[in-house]
């Protein structure tokens, strides 16, 4: 984790990179912190068909904006967070 944290820090400082941390079945905010990624750039998502589609669409929008020299908005992950929290915990199959 320390080497990844150093690499993230170098890329952010030297190259102006942005990092988004997306996690399923983990505490993404806490894990992102270990790698030097801020909690505003971390999100949990529902790892199913609908959640993954939403994830890709949302991240695509954030990346397209960043590539067009626009800052990543503070609410870039809102759609993912809303989907994750609105569907609650996934129940196992019977």
Image (cartoon, rainbow, N blue to C red):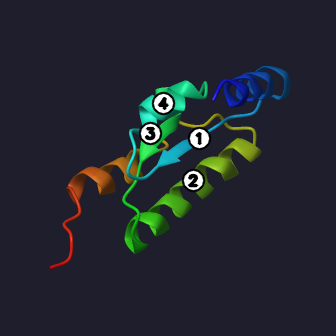
Give the secondary structure at mark 2. Answer: helix
Q: Nearer the viewer, residue 49 or 61?
A: 49
Q: Is residue 84 above or below residue 37?
A: below
Q: Which residue is mark 4?
A: 40
Q: Is residue 21 left or right of residue 78?
A: right
Q: Which residue is mark 2?
A: 59
Sequence-wise, which precedes: disc 4 or disc 1?
1
Where residue 59 appears, x then y in whole percent? 57, 53
Q: Which residue is mark 3?
A: 28
- What is the quadrant of the N terminus in the image? top right
Name the mark nearer the viewer: 1 or 3.
3
Q: Nearer the viewer, residue 75 or 52?
A: 52
- Residue located 31% across and 54% down the image: 84
Sequence-wise, which precedes: disc 4 or disc 2?
4
Give the secondary structure at mark 3. Answer: helix
Q: Is residue 24 left or right of residue 62?
A: left
**Spatial CA span between label 3 and label 4:** 11 Å
Looking at this view, name the residue that lies furthest to the left: 94
**Spatial CA span between label 1 and label 2:** 8 Å
Q: Nearer the viewer, residue 73 or 87?
A: 87
Q: Is residue 82 above or below residue 39?
A: below
Q: Is residue 70 left or right of residue 20?
A: right
**Spatial CA span between label 4 and label 2:** 14 Å
Sequence-wise, which precedes: disc 3 or disc 4?
3
> Do the CB atoms of the residues marked 2 and 3 lie less than 8 Å apart?
no
> Do the CB atoms of the residues marked 1 and 2 lie less than 8 Å apart?
yes
Q: Nearer the viewer, residue 69 or 13?
A: 13
Quarter of the image holding residue 87?
bottom left
Within 10 Å of disc 4 (Cα), the crowding (few <14, some 14-19, many 20+) is some
**Spatial CA span between label 1 and label 3:** 10 Å
Q: Which circle marks residue 20 in the picture? A: 1
């Amino acid at each position: 984790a320390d080497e990844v944290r150093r690499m993230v820090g170098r890329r952010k400082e030297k190259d102006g990179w942005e990092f988004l941390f997306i996690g399923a079945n983990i505490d993404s905010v806490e894990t992102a912190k270990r790698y030097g990624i801020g909690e505003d750039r971390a999100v949990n998502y529902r790892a199913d068909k609908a959640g993954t589609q939403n994830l890709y669409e949302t991240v695509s929008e954030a990346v397209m904006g960043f590539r067009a020299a626009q800052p990543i908005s503070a609410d870039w992950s809102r759609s993912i967070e809303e989907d994750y929290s609105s569907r609650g915990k996934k129940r196992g199959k019977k």
